[in-house]
């Protein structure tokens, strides 16, 4: 399979140009287009000779994806539906904050093998991992859409990134490479459903990345109602892995908690969550559920407030995600499901859902 131009490091660009008989300064020019001007398409790299541009287009995916739709999702958030080279779809979100900073929310997989019961991302099962170059192209397409670099990146789109360490970690390396995209690790958050082996590998990087753990329940019995077997790990193991990450990275971990009415929103559960968070020096971020169809409901405002008070009463730090996007487009994974349904309705393909973990 072809490589992705966006995944090449500065030194790889050097060696590829040399091997193809192009002078070294051409590699530096391509690097400038990618890493500084944030342009992934050789056709737009106007200071390159035509034959080099043509070779790049022929030999690499450059770019491999395009924006199929840009949809407002409320609160100035824009959801981008991206169409991949094999006609699969993923989503990213462009999220402006009040202070002018912009966060990109990026996907790491097509579908998700974890299949949390409330989440649209895993609804049609797991298709495939994104390649390192595709993860970087998401970032580049977002920059093209925004007209500049974003300030923060959160891997909270479709997929369980820590089940795709083999592609996500090289992408993190490129993003933070001083000869690459030069992002500070503390501006990049990886969110996990609590996949312990991946959390421990992430800790081994010993970089100041931010780790967010989607706990959703303080006890295993409640968690089992939300996250199915076999990719659900015990709460105690997850918190031990979070401790390891904190010790190795020097960063406090965030515990994310999607509030589902009647399942995990009782004040006693809030208190139990707060005690765990306090003991493990973790912050709590509450995310009121965005409806995706199905059995779950978002708790009423007063119930959410009472839950937050119960967490805070233990001394733990708690925030509640400000409404980020609303309505149909807000819940991640929904646009992709809609696009698949349109494709299936048009008889383009059938949906098969291999539920396996690849490329650990
Ligand atoms: N797989 C990773 C990252 C992607 S999901 C993880 O689970 O952490 C990112 C966050 O969005 C998770 O905390 C998840 O619980 C939350 N989320 C997904 N769908 C949601 C929905 N419909 N409503 C509220 N939160 C949702
Ligand atoms: Fe996958 Fe995260 Fe959605 Fe769970 S919440 S199905 S882990 S994307």
Image (tube, helix red, strand yellow):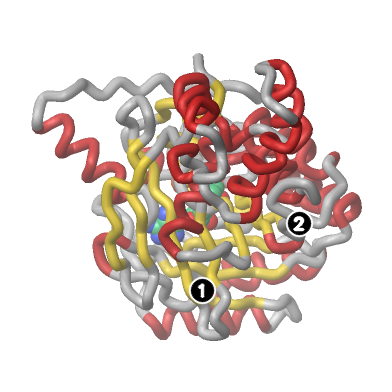
Which mark lies nearer to you, 2 or 1?
A: 2
Of the numbered discs in the image, which one, if any, rests on residue 81? none
**Residue 146, horizontal then vertical, whole percent:** 45, 65
Name the foreground residue: 128 vs 300. Answer: 128
Q: Is residue 90 left or right of residue 143?
A: left
Could you say which quadrant of the image residue 121 lies in? Answer: top left
Residue lying furthest left: 346
- Say which element carries label 1: loop
**Residue 303, horizontal then vertical, whole percent:** 43, 79
Task: Mark 1: give few (<14), some (14-19) or many (20+) Cα within 10 Å.
Answer: few
Name the foreground residue: 103 vs 218. Answer: 103
Q: Is residue 220 left or right of residue 327?
A: right
Whether residue 265 is visible here, answered yes or no, is yes
Which tag, 2 or 1, sits closer to the chain's start?
A: 2
Could you say which quadrant of the image residue 21 lies in? Answer: top right
Whether residue 163 is visible here, answered yes or no, is no
**Residue 74, horizontal then vertical, whole percent:** 32, 73
Q: Exactly how many numbered labels are in the figure?
A: 2
Q: Quadrant of the C terminus?
A: top right
- Say which element carries label 2: helix
Q: Which residue is mark 1?
A: 321
> Vertical placement of 174 versus 278: above or below?
above
Disc 1 under 8 Å from ligand 1? The reply is no
Give the Cα separation between the discs numbered 2 and 1: 22 Å
Q: Which residue is mark 2?
A: 185
């Amino acid at each position: 399979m072809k490589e992705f131009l966006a995944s090449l490091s500065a030194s790889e660009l050097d060696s590829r140009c040399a091997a193809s008989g192009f002078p070294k300064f051409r590699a530096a020019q391509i690097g400038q287009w990618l890493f500084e001007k944030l342009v992934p398409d050789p056709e737009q790299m106007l200071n390159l000779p035509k034959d080099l541009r043509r070779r790049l287009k022929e030999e690499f995916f450059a770019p491999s994806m395009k924006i199929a739709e840009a949809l407002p999702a409320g609160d100035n958030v824009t959801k981008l539906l991206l169409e991949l080279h094999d006609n699969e779809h993923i989503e990213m979100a462009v999220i402006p904050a009040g202070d002018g900073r912009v966060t990109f929310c990026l996907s790491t997989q097509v579908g998700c093998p974890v299949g949390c019961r409330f989440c649209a991302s895993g609804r049609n099962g797991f298709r495939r991992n994104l390649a390192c170059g595709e993860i970087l192209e998401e970032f580049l397409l977002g920059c093209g859409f925004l007209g500049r670099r974003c300030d923060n990146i959160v891997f909270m789109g479709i997929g369980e990134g820590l089940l795709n360490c083999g592609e996500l970690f090289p992408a993190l390396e490129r993003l933070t490479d001083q000869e690459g995209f030069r992002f500070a690790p503390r501006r990049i958050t990886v969110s996990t459903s609590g996949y312990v082996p991946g959390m421990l590998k992430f800790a081994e990087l010993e970089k100041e990345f931010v780790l967010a753990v989607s706990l959703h329940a303080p006890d295993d019995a409640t968690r089992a109602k939300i996250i199915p077997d076999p990719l659900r790990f015990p709460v105690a193991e997850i918190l031990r892995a979070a401790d390891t990450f904190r010790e190795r990275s020097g960063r406090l971990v965030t515990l994310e908690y999607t509030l589902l009415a009647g399942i995990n929103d009782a004040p006693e559960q809030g208190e139990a969550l707060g005690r765990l968070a306090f003991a493990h020096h973790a912050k709590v971020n509450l995310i009121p559920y965005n409806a995706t169809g199905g059995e779950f409901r978002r708790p009423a405002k007063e119930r959410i407030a009472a839950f937050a008070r119960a967490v805070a009463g233990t001394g733990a730090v708690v925030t509640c995600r400000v409404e980020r996007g609303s309505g149909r487009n807000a819940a991640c994974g929904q646009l992709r499901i809609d696009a698949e349904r349109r494709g299936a309705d048009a008889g383009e393909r059938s949906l098969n859902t291999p539920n396996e973990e690849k490329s650990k």
